[in-house]
Image (spheres, grey):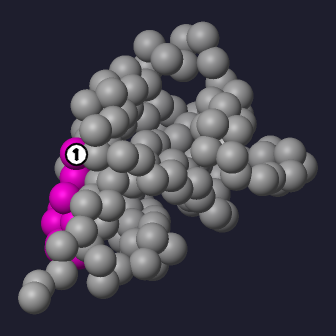
Amino acid sequence: MSTYTQSLYQIVFSTKDREKTLIKDNREDLFRYIWGVLKNKDCHLYRIGGVEDHIHIVTHIHPSIAVSSLVKDIKLASSDYIKTQNLFPDFKAWQVGYASFTYSFSDKDKLIEYVKNQETHHHKKTFREELIELLNEHQVEFDEKYLL
């Protein structure tokens, strides 16, 4: 028998110190690059989006890959890409850590729309508020002192 999985994840991480360095003009280039990283890891990207200080990735993760390894690879590769291409001149690094949430496949379309509408969403809510909401929704225990 083969291995069959359907693991739908939302991965969220921020720029270092939540600096608003991901300027809109070059975000699509970054998103396409991350899509390539995911494809090379046999992951299926459903949607990637974000604003000046953070990104959201909705993806199926190949069963042989740990989420932490995938996020590490995305951050390392994209940091290098940002710097060599000078995509975001004020970008220093990604934050340490990330948030990852699993979803039922039946929630896929709703989740994609949520990530697609990040710019509109963040006219009303900060990243910190959004992250706390996601953590609470998924019943993840956290210490607010680590949510700079």
Drawn side of residue 3 relative to residue 110, left or right = left
Q: Which residue is outermost to the bottom?
A: 1
**Which quarter of the image is occupied by the N terminus?**
bottom left
Percent coordinates x, y for residue 96 in the rendering: 66, 64
Does residue 34 show up?
no
Q: Which is more toward the observer, 116 or 84?
A: 116
Does residue 53 show up?
yes
| Amino acid carrying mark 1 in the image | Tyr
Reply above or below: 105 against 122.
below
- Looking at the rendering, the stretch of residues picked out in magenta corresponds to 36-46
Q: Which is more toward the observer, 48 or 17?
A: 48
Give the residue number, with chain letter if any, for mark 1.
Answer: 46
Percent coordinates x, y for residue 126 in the rendering: 66, 24
Q: Which is more toward the observer, 73 or 110?
A: 110
Drawn side of residue 145 relative to residue 119, left or right = right
Reply above or below: 8 against 42.
above
Identity of the residue drawn at 41% across and 47% down: 103
